[in-house]
Structures are given as structure tokens and as C-alpha cells.
Image (cartoon, rainbow, N blue to C red):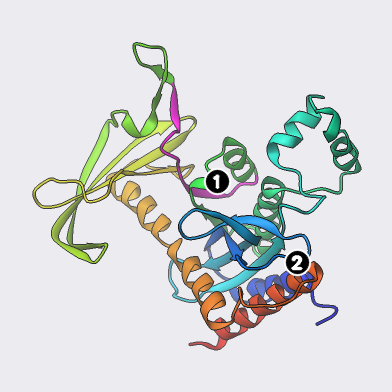
Amino acid sequence: MSTLDDELVNDALTAEAIRSLSNESSIYLIHDPSDIRKPYSTKAEKLGKVRDLKNNIINGYSTYNVIAITPSSKSVHLISHESYSNKDPKFLKAELVRKVESNNLKEDQAYLKEVHDSGDWHNKKTLTKDRVQTVSANLKKTNKLQNITHIMDREFDDDEYFSTIALQGDDFVIRAKKSRSVDDTMDSKAKKTRLIDSSFPNQYIHKLQKVRFKKTCYQDANLLVEWQECLNYTAVKITAKTRDGKEIFANPMLLITNKSVATAERALLIYQIYLKRSRIETVFKFLKEGLGWEDMQLRNFLGIQRLLSFCFFIAAYLYKIGD
């Protein structure tokens, strides 16, 4: 394991994915981070900060992962894994990068300019953009006509990600934050109106036999599917309601996509595509509960990275032979 690292694992998994998926016309790439929670660790090298299930700040490490699925198959392909620490000296938070580039550092932060200027630094945004570009480019090496859709959660609601994906000829379905606004709409106090609160011109009611939420089953539920063009893309809003018209969830789901949405069926499809993001949550559950992703007792950061990569590689193999 002394020579096994993220890069070698990713190369091997990408090669297998290319072989398995080269004839597929459509591929969904699901991107998602997963925290490695080590609440009782104190002496591990480069121990960072993450959130526990109750949203408390605890010790741990961060990972960025990509899996691939297709619309027509239940198979899961683990493609890319990277682990990192936000306490690594080479990790520069986005706000620090902005301060460096605007020459707005405090005296005790002067060393950050040297780190930045070296080019040998990273953060979540650089990792995300690299994975979005590299994984897509590798898959297209054998089939340039493949339609690739990137599925991502709310933390990736960022215009920079939208443009990066669109410019490379791919599609995306990304869940939007509640705070996303409609730029050209203001209220009486000249504040930006939240997109989630705006009126959507296109609506469709989709009937559901049942919806399960927090151990409650709602019979004969309805999905209010709404869509409109917004910010050069299309926004799709989904509101789940009981047969009596009461909303099941606290807030509607808001999705942003660059896919064409001209009909109710297409709007509903965007929602169905996003729901496939749950497949990566199942992978994380297996990695943590089945392979002990959070149970390692190593203190050396490089050793921790290699062990996490090794588990990801084994999980990819087990998913491969699982059928």
C-alpha cells in the first residue's frame, strides 16, 4: 500500500469506467463530498474540521468523490476519490484566495501570498473544477458523442460551476440554495427576490400513489412541477403535497439545469435525474459501515489518504462483482 495513492486509484478506476461505459450514449456523473469524522482524534497529522450529523464542528478529514451511473442500468461505477484536510498549509479557503488576489491580507497572513503564488495550493473549488473537467474529458476519450450530466447538491450552487460544465459541452442538474435570487426582480425595498419565492409561469401536477417522509406514508400525493427560464439556464421547482393540498416538506426543491426543458415531461425528468444523487449516499454508507472508512487509527496524513483510497478501490471492485 506504500505506493497506492489517490492518483493511481483514480487512473485505474477511470480506465475501468472507460472500458465499461464506452458504448453508453448517456452517463450521469454524481459528485459529492463526504466527511471522515474523527471526533476523538487529537494527534493525527493535519487534522481538519468537519461537521457531524448534528451540524457540530468536530475533528476530521474531507473527501471528494465521483461515481457514474447510466439511465438504463442499476450498475454503479466508482470513478474518482480525493481526500484532503482544510488544515493543510496548502489548503486556501476561497475567501483567503480573494484576499490574496485583492492584496487585502493582514500582517500575520502575509505568508499566504507565497503559498498562493507558488501555484501549489488547493481548496474545494479547485478540486471540484478539476474533477468536473478531468473525469468528463477521460470518459470522452473513446466516445466524444457521449452526453454527460453532472448531478450535484446545493453546496455546488455556483455560477462558476455552471459555466465550467456548460463550456465543456456537458449538462448539469444542480440543486439550488434557498437564497438563490432572481437578478432582475426586486421587491418594494429593492432587495433581490428569492427564486424559490417567485412565480413560475409553467406548471404541471404529477400524481403519486405514495410518498414516504420521516416514517410517514402519504397516500395519493401530488407533485407540483414548475419551471421557467432563469439566469441563462432553467429552474425547476418541485413541491410535494398531500391529497388535501398541504405541503409535505418544509420547502420546495429548487433545481437548476442547462438541459432543454420545454415540456412538463422534461421538467419532471430533471427532478427524476436529481433523485439519482441518492446512489452516492448508498456508496458512502457502504464505505463507512462495511469497510470502516472512519475507523482507521493512523496518525500519518499520507497513510490516512492511502487507506481511504484503498477502501474506495476495494468498494469499486465489490460493486463491480456485486451483480
Residue drawn at (44%, 75%), measured in percent from left and top? 74
Q: Is residue 252 toward the left or the right of residue 16 in the image?
A: left
Towards the viewer: 237 or 83: 83
Specify whether residue 76 is painted magenta.
Answer: no
- Report the magenta residues as a range: 168-183
Classed neighbour count for the residue bearing mark 2: other residues with Cα under 10 Å, few (<14), some (14–19), many (≥20): few
Would you place residue 133 above or below residue 96 in this image? below
Q: How many marks?
A: 2
Residue 287 locus on image (x, y percent)? 56, 76
Instruction: Tell me if mark 1 has few (under 14), some (14-19) or many (20+) residues whose alpha carbon lies within 10 angstroms of its own.
Output: some
Is 175 in front, or is 92? 92
Residue mark closest to the camera, 1 vs 2: 2
**Residue visible at 69% across and 39% down in the picture:** 94
The residue under label 1 is which amino acid type?
Phe
**Residue in the picture at 86% in, 49% down:** 120
Task: Please give left or right for residue 57 compared with residue 245 in the image.
Answer: right
Which residue carries the number 1 mark? 156
Location of residue 316 by image quarter: bottom right
The amino acid marked with disc number 2 is Lys
The location of residue 79, given as percent across then percent down, is 64, 69
Which mark is on residue 255?
A: none
300 relative to 182 in the view: left or right: right
Horizontal and vertical percent position of residue 180: 45, 33
Image: 191 above or below 226: above
- Rendered view: 163 above or below 321: above
Reading the image, the residue beneath label 2 is 43
Mark 1 lies on a secondary structure that is helix
